[in-house]
Image (cartoon, rainbow, N blue to C red):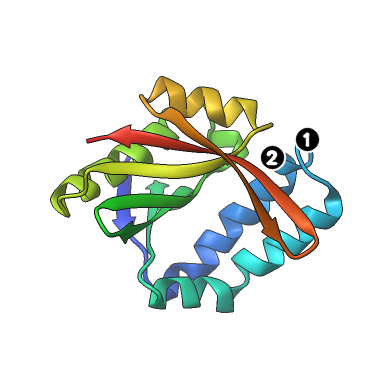
C-alpha cells in the first residue's frame, strides 16, 4: 500500500470536491438543516469557490492511498496562527488514522512557518469531531456564533499550542 500527502493545485479541485461530496451531507445531516447544508456546500465547495480559496492563500493537502484520494485538509496562515478551515476524510476511510495524519501535516507546516498555534472552528453539536480534536491535543478556547446570511454558525474555537 502506498500512502501519500501532497499539496493540492487547481488541477486537484475535482478530487477535493469528490471527497466533500461523499462526506458533507452524511456528516452534517445530523447537525444542521438540509437547507443550511445545501447553502454552505454551494458556498464553499464549488470549483470556483475552491479556486478562489487557493488564490486567497489557502493551502490544501490531499491524502491518497494507492492513488485514491481519501481525505483533505486546508490551512491558512493568519498572522502567527495557522487556521484549519476544512478537514474531511471519506466515510469509508474514517477511523484509520488519516485525519490524524492530515492534522500532523498541518502542525508540521505551521511549525515551519513559525506559527504559535493551530486553530479551527467546529460546530458545537459536532461531538464526534470535537472528541477527535481533543484526542489530538486541541482545547476549546472560545464559544462563538457567526451569522451567515439567514443561518447561524454555532461554533467552538479550538486551539493547539505549538
Q: Nearer the viewer, residue 81 or 12?
A: 81
Q: Residues within 10 Å of mark 2 (few under 14, many from 20)?
A: some
Residue in view at x 85 percent, y 56 percent: 35
What percent of the width, then of the height, locates residue 158?
45, 35
In this image, 117 relative to 130: left or right?
left
What percent of the width, then of the height, locates residue 91? Answer: 61, 37
Q: Are marks 2 and 1 in contact (CB under 8 Å)?
A: yes
Label ID, residue 30 = 1
Distance (Cα) linking label 2 and label 1? 7 Å
Q: Secondary structure at mark 1?
A: loop
Q: Is residue 96 visible?
A: no
Residue under the point 59% across and 59% down: 18
User: For residue 75, what is the image quadrant?
Assistant: bottom left
Indicate the quadrant where residue 60 lies. Answer: bottom left
Residue position marked by numbered label 2 in the rendering? 27
Quadrant for the C terminus, please.
top left
Residue 129 placement, left or right of 54: right
Q: In the image, residue 122 lies at what x, y percent?
A: 56, 40
Vertically, is 88 above or below 50? Answer: above
Which quadrant of the figure contains the N terminus? top left
Residue 79 visible here = yes
Q: Residue at x 50, y 36 (%)?
A: 142
Q: Is residue 1 above or below residue 84?
A: above
- Judging depth in this view, the residue of 86 and 143 nearest the camera is 143
Q: Residues within 10 Å of mark 1 (few under 14, many from 20)?
A: few
Amino acid at each position: 500500500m502506498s500512502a501519500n500527502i501532497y499539496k493540492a493545485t487547481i488541477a486537484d479541485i475535482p478530487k477535493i470536491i469528490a471527497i466533500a461530496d461523499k462526506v458533507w451531507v452524511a456528516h452534517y445531516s445530523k447537525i444542521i438543516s438540509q437547507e443550511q447544508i445545501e447553502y454552505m456546500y454551494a458556498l464553499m465547495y464549488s470549483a470556483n469557490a475552491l479556486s478562489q480559496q487557493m488564490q486567497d492563500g489557502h493551502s490544501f493537502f490531499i491524502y491518497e492511498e494507492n492513488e485514491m484520494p481519501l481525505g483533505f485538509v486546508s490551512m491558512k496562515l493568519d498572522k502567527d496562527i495557522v487556521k484549519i478551515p476544512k478537514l474531511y476524510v471519506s466515510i469509508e476511510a474514517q477511523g484509520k488514522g488519516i485525519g490524524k495524519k492530515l492534522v500532523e501535516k498541518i502542525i508540521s507546516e505551521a511549525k515551519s512557518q513559525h506559527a504559535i498555534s493551530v486553530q479551527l472552528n467546529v460546530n458545537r453539536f459536532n461531538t464526534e469531531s470535537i472528541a477527535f480534536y481533543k484526542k489530538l491535543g486541541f482545547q476549546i478556547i472560545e464559544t462563538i456564533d457567526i451569522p451567515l446570511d439567514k443561518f447561524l454558525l454555532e461554533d467552538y474555537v479550538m486551539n493547539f499550542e505549538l
